[in-house]
Image (spheres, coloured by chain):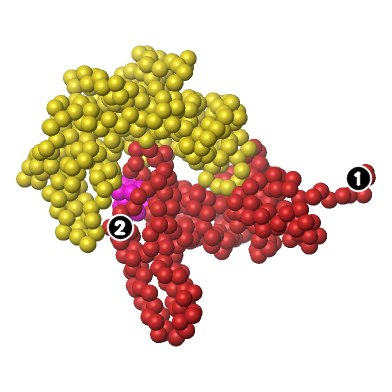
Amino acid sequence: MHSVEDILTALGREPPGQILMINLLRSLDAGVVKRRPVRDVLERFAGVLANDALPLPKNAVLAQRLGCFFTVANAWVDSTVPQLDFYAGGKEFALSRVVEYERFYRMLNSSDVPDRHLPVPRAPWASGGGEIAHADIDRVARYINGTAWRDEMESRGLAIRIPCAWLTPRPQLDKRLHASDSRLADHYRDLIGLPHLRAGHHLIRFDFTLIQGHPPERCKYRRPHGAGNGGTRFRFHDAGAGPGCGWGRSVDLRRVRRHHASNIEGVPELVMGEFAPPLATVSAHYIGCVRRGPEREDAFFIAALSGNGNVANLAATLFDKVMS
Amino acid sequence: MTMQLLPHEVDRLSNRWVRAKSVPSRSTSAAGQRAYYIDKLTNEIGAWLAEGLEAWQFGAQRQYAFAPVAWLIGTRREDDSYLDSLADLGKALAHHNDPSYIEPPDDAGDSSDEMDDVPAGVPLGAPFANGAAIAVRDLAHKLTATPAARHELLTALKDALVLVQRLRPGKVRGPLLGSWNLLFGSARQLAALFPEGREALVLQHAYLRALYPAMHAGQDKELFSRLLSDFGSALAGAELAGVLADDYEQCLLRMRFIERLSSGNVIERAARAGTERQREGALLEGASPLWLERLLPRERTSGDGP
């Protein structure tokens, strides 16, 4: 039977698992995640994988799956809660989220009924433009940048209901990115730290205005921490005191690519559960097509996470901290 | 948006879906036993989906909705909706056979030639997709019987229809047409369930979008025509326009195209210009009827010049 120890040992062998464990240990040390819930999740996870006749999954899948377990267990405990208007500067304030074209299309279209405005998304590796053929980009961009898509959702009785939304303050993106940037889509992807976005993906930014559509009280939000599903380019942010420390920080993939070990921070980010903003408070903006794949320097990123690149005892350290 | 399922997860789902592994009598053929098993599995999946979709609407129950694989639903960072993960689960299951399925014994009464015709194993993709249609049926029934949870059940039903649209089950007509009649078949029921007329229209529209891929064969043509007629009447009386009217027009075009295709003269002409099967295949894949219309030779009317 695969025990918790077996699972942690397996995770500690390769980068995806190592990245998850480093973040989890740092989150435990910072006190934003409690030991008992982590132990419960690990034991439940081991229970699911208990069948010895079946091998443990590959490291990346094992890490991703454990992240899902943490998320569904709803480990929302945090010592601080981000102040939502901290980055507003007295102006209208929006939280932003970047998705690829296929997600935008699927939000509007689940059926085979042809969409008169939007072409069916192609594979990102399709020649002649990736997800969107070159000839269609202008009209798609005009449609996305307008408000007709919201009217269509309203007509169809559709709503935005994101179960676990990772969001960034729009003013922070505006500060670091400029519309004149010829590689704008690549830089959006890198600054927010989204390694699943590859060359050929066309990016759309959603802005959720808070002043009009402030989340209701029951909507939970927190700084991202290691007991979540941050993915392979997530680093738990633990710094300082005061209202700004309630926010996490994305990893800037461009800095990772250039091996800037001293500072790989991107932009502030937080996680919201059950995020369902009114459509009238949502706007979309077409960014462009990603040209280059994300960086994949696992070794450098782990060194930046751990401080010294020493990952030899991660499994034992985590086991002792949580299970004993 | 691919999902890799662990064999452990497939095991858990299979055990959850097939509670009683009773085997029909030996007098049933191997093919009959397999069909019976698939039918039972589909209904169990449908009930599971209906329960999960309903539970999801109550926030406090979400961590238990879709047990025993609740961690797969709505937990990915890139998901914009929990329906993304459900649809991806359905697609991932297409690559897995049901581990609970026991091949019928060799002496089930079939000749060795007949046994060769029975596929091995039961892939889970089709039962899951067809189960989504069953979930629509089950939720529609529950909506009529549980006024206290009307809002949540209505949302769950709409979500189930979106799931059907994403998964494109092969057996969609029976559950959807039956539940359409249940919900919209009588004016009294309509008024009781949908005091605000717009809700009914939006729901009917979701039904039509889910049925669109199935509007291609002669069977149930009259039923589809009636559905479209009812929807068209409701649309005409409403202030809504735009996308609902556009989709209605697309469905009408599809039906009219099918009617023309089933006309002998059209088939003969199409056979000369190409193959009917190619056009039918393109239509099944969701190609716009407008585009397909252009493929067919134009009918000459008395007003046309030489």
For the residue pair B94 and A129, the one nearer the viewer reads as: A129
| Residue B257 position in % (x across, y down) | 72, 53
The three-letter amino acid code for the residue at tag 2 is: Pro
What residue is disc 2 on?
B7
Image hue for chain A: yellow
| B71 versus A271 height, above or below | below
Image hue for chain B: red
Tell me which numbered mark, 1 or 2, is placed earlier along the sequence: 2
| A188 versus B11 height, above or below | above
Check whether the beta carbons of the residues at disc 1 and disc 2 lie within 8 A of each other.
no
Q: Is residue A269 magenta?
A: no
Q: Quadrant of residue A47?
A: bottom left
For image coordinates 45% across by 62% down, the residue present is: B127
| Residue A191 position in % (x across, y down) | 35, 23
What residue is disc 1 on?
B304
- Mark 1 and mark 2 on one chain: yes
Q: Which residues are magenta?
A: B54-73
| B145 versus A283 height, above or below | below
